[in-house]
Amino acid sequence: MSTKPSDSSATKVSIVDDDEGIRSSLASLIRRAPALKFIGDYANAEIALRQIPKNLPDVVLMDINMPGMKGFECVRQLKAQLPKVQFLMLTVYEDSDSLFNSLKAGASGYLLKRTATKNLIEAIRDVHAGGSPLSPQLARRVVMFFNEPADKRDGMANLTAGEREFLEQLAKGYAYKEIADRMHISIDTVRSYVRTVYEKLHVHSRTEAVVKFISGGG
């Protein structure tokens, strides 16, 4: 007797990745996995924004660095429309910027593409069940941040409205020139914000500034 679940009980999964080979491999993997149902794959974020609301998956495997819109911005827009859909970032990027940008955008998990097949399937089921799977080394970064003494985060209260807006744009992943255009300010003003924000937050890098902004409720 077949134990394959009915379509109504299976977890519906979609894939967003610009690499056709990766999409094909993941789709094949999902089709073979018990209790999962592959329902669509998309080559870029723009197509995903149009099609995912029509197909309503339970879980979306999202790449980060695609031509055009980045994966975490796609997650941000889709999560606003579809709060019940769970997004699991599947990427080659281990940097803290990508991790925290994705979590702030609404992703529920973040795994590296080299994750073993068994662990990936478990992560899809976990995120659908309400979990937040992270690769061990990335989970360590989150823990280390929240172990930081609270008095090092107090600088958020000292930021001006302009500095907070700059930091928000920084957290969304925009480059300095893009931030200048979006805020209608000069690139010199952006550089000034970099200096004052770093000084007030007691940080020395973009990643540290973004992490403190996220934790401070920005």
Image: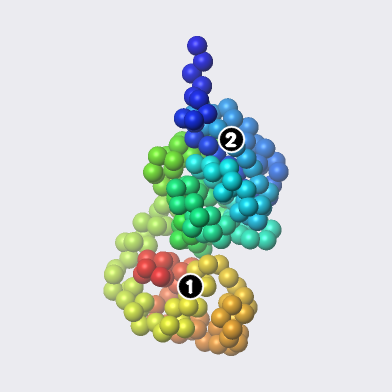
Relative image position of residue 210 (x, y in whole percent): 46, 69
* N-term-proximal mark, 1 vs 2: 2
Answer above or below: position of 79 versus 166.
above
Answer above or below: position of 138 versus 27.
below
125 lies left or right of 184 = left
Relative image position of residue 156 (x, y in whole percent): 36, 77
Answer above or below: position of 117 versus 104.
above
Q: Amino acid at mark 1?
A: Glu
Q: Is residue 213 visible?
A: yes
Q: Residues within 10 Å of mark 1 (few under 14, many from 20)?
A: some
Report which quarter residue 174 is drawn in: bottom right
> Secondary structure under badge 1?
helix
Relative image position of residue 36 (x, y in whole percent): 52, 32
Q: Residue at x 60, y 73 (%)?
A: 175
Q: Residue at x 34, y 61 (%)?
A: 146
Residue at the front extreme, as displayed = 54
Disc 1 designates what residue? 168
Q: Residue at x 54, y 43 (%)?
A: 56
Q: Amino acid at mark 2?
A: Phe
Q: Closer to the observer: label 1 or label 2? A: 2
Relative image position of residue 183 (x, y in whole percent): 56, 81
Report which quarter residue 215 is drawn in: bottom left
7 lies left or right of 66 = left
Distance in Å between CA atoms under marks 1 and 2: 35 Å
